[in-house]
Image (spheres, helix red, strand yellow):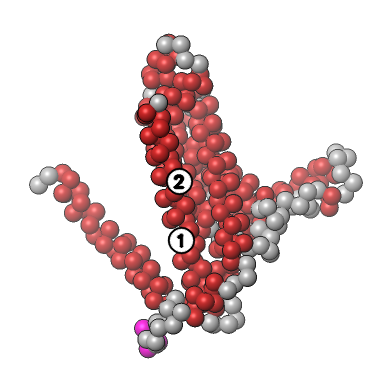
Amino acid sequence: MPASIRLALMLLPAVVVLGGLFLGGLVLAIIRTVGIVPFAGRFDPTLEPWTRALQEPDLLLSILVTLWVAAASTLIATALGVGAALLLHRAGGGRLVTLLVQFNLTVPHVVTAVGMAWLLGQSGVLARLAHGAGAIDRPGDFPALVNDPWFVADIVAYVAKEVPFVAVVALAMLAAVGSAPAITARCLGATPLQAFRHVTWPLIRPGILAAATVVFAFVLGTYEVPAVLGPSHPKALPVLAYQMFTSNDIADRPAAIVVSLLMAAVGVVCLVAVRRLMRGISGLEVVR
């Protein structure tokens, strides 16, 4: 039996179980949004949950701010993660430094969010240090980064969590590529920036784009960080969906599922658009 078929057969049970759970949950969610609840004996279709969700006053604003947080966090985390990986790779990547980079991977996002609230709040550590240094008259004069309409503290928390993840992926890609291509480019007269741009980056880009995709998808759908650090208005889309689902009005629950499905759809559309854009950029580079 070929190795590929044997591997497929070994993975088949896990794929069937996970696929069944995912698709089963997705199908139940979709039919719930059209008013069908098989376990309760309700089979009369209705679009009332969709109407209720789409008439939510803050829906569009929540989508926009969620996309803003996801895009900003992904771009900053990816840039810093790749930069940190390059520095570690050039320095030989000592075990202690690498361990310190990877340490934050085990910290839950909710713990990071609470830590950022304690650090960046107007009564937090930085505010008190600034007051003690005489930079501000009182801690309350510190910029309101927590519960800020621009989600500054949220972005900082996501960046702090996702930079190590991107750095670990980038280090793995750099180790697989090795130093020979960049050294060859340098020997042929390329500057360090040119060697990275034209040699190293094209080789590690697939892995970095995959890591950035994971970061974007996670930030888009996570609840803990915006619930702790985000403002009460506008709400991030996961927070809006959760509040609708836990509303006292039980009719809001199907509408909350609609909001969650919209969030997933927006994420898929964004990811497909980015992949096509990057594929087009790669094609232009090949032509050049």
Which of the pair 136/286 is nearer the observer? 286
**Which is nearer the N-term, disc 2 or disc 1?**
1
Identity of the amino acid at label 1? Ala
Q: Give the alpha-carbon distance from disc 2 to disc 1, as whole Å.
A: 15 Å
Identity of the amino acid at label 2? Val
Place of residue 199 in the rendered image (x, y in percent of width and height, measured from the top left):
41, 24
* Up/down of 42 relative to 178, above or below: below
Q: Residue at x 48, y 20 (%)?
A: 194
- Horizontally, is 73 left or right of 13 in the view? right
Residue that numbered label 1 is attached to: 264
* Up/down of 92 relative to 157, above or below: above
Q: Residue at x 38, y 24 (%)?
A: 178
Q: How many numbered dots are placed on residues in this image?
A: 2
Q: Main secondary structure of the magenta part?
A: helix
Q: Residues within 10 Å of mark 2 (few under 14, many from 20)?
A: some
Nearest to viewer (mark 2 / mark 1): 2
Place of residue 211 in the rendered image (x, y in percent of width and height, measured from the top left):
45, 43
* 198 drawn magenta: no
| Residue 231: assigned label | none
| Screen quadrant of the C terminus | top left
- Horizontally, is 35 left or right of 6 in the view? right
Residue that numbered label 2 is attached to: 274
Which residue range is magenta in the image?
37-41
Place of residue 259 in the rendered image (x, y in percent of width and height, measured from the top left):
51, 68
User: Based on the displayed image, in which of its 4 quarters is residue 276 positioned?
Assistant: top left
Q: Please indicate, yes or no, whether residue 245 appears anywhere in the rendered image.
A: no
